[in-house]
Amino acid sequence: MSASSKKKLRKEQEAAKLTEKQLIAQQEAKKNSLYTTLFVVVLTAILVIAVVVGVKQTLTTSGIREKNTTALTVGNHELNSIEMNYFFMDAVNNFYSSYGSYASMFGLDVTKPLNEQFVDEEAGLTWADDFMTSAKDSAASIYALADAAEAAGFTLPEAEKEALETSLESLDLYATMYGYSNADQYLKAMYGNGASKKTYQAYCEKQALASAYYAEYADSLTYEDADLRAAEADLRELIERLLDQMRVTFVDNFTKLQGYFSETFTRLFGGGKAELLLMDPEDPLNC
């Protein structure tokens, strides 16, 4: 092989090596570009997920959703979920305050969720449904009275204003007593997301105005003796119906308790018999 041929061959081999290096470099560049693209995509996905979770968490705990959800329409008023929660929880608390020690006689276990206990199982009516109905009725009455008060130019008397201010000021004290840093956190724990001192104050002011107006209206009414007698008869009838319902519920629950007691006694002592008896089965509520 001539010298020129060898020289030409060396050049071709060098060119081939250079081309191979370029191909390898291009492949590495493509691979790095792919890895970079994948990294950016994954990072973007993580950021999107984080933002979505953050937004969802904010919507869940901030009360924005509750504030913008219409739960009840009363006349020209649209009550959001926050406002309805005030009426609902007050309906529950008023019942517990009045009948807490007798709740079981009504078939209510205060240790269990309200939506898992039935007032009327055949109708599918839970205690949560029942309290919500009471809350809606209360809201309708309060707003109707407040509207009537405003239409009549009635304003909250000074004594009621001072009492309301004192009550609202005590919220911070209650918050501290129960381990909350401020009234907003305390109210949120009591009434749910979105509850705050500002919204609770508006709720209380509406309640106070309606109550004061009703009291003044009631005081302005006059009654005939026959009206009073009729009202008394209606009240007695209502009391009798409630007592009848309480007797039935009490006896039913007592019978169940009697069975549980007998079974437990036999199981604990390996035999024998024990039972619970009412001193006066004819008048179970006064035993």
Image (cartoon, helix red, strand yellow):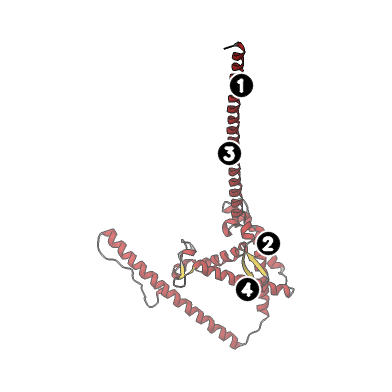
Which residue carries the number 3 mark?
Answer: 38
Secondary structure found at label 1: helix
Residue 20 on image: x %, y %: 58, 25
For label 2, the SS is helix
Precedes in sequence: disc 4 or disc 3: 3
Image quarter (top left, top right, bottom left or bottom right) of the C terminus: bottom left
Residue holding disc 1: 15
Q: Earlier in the sequence, mark 2 or mark 3?
A: 3
Q: CA distance from mark 3 to mark 1?
A: 34 Å
Q: Quadrant of residue 208?
A: bottom right
Q: Which is in the foreground here, disc 4 or disc 3?
A: 3
**Structural distance between the alpha carbons of marks 2 and 3:** 60 Å
Q: Position of residue 221 (x, y in %)?
A: 66, 82
119 or 43: nearer the viewer: 43
Dot 2 corresponds to which residue?
165
Amino acid bearing label 1:
Ala
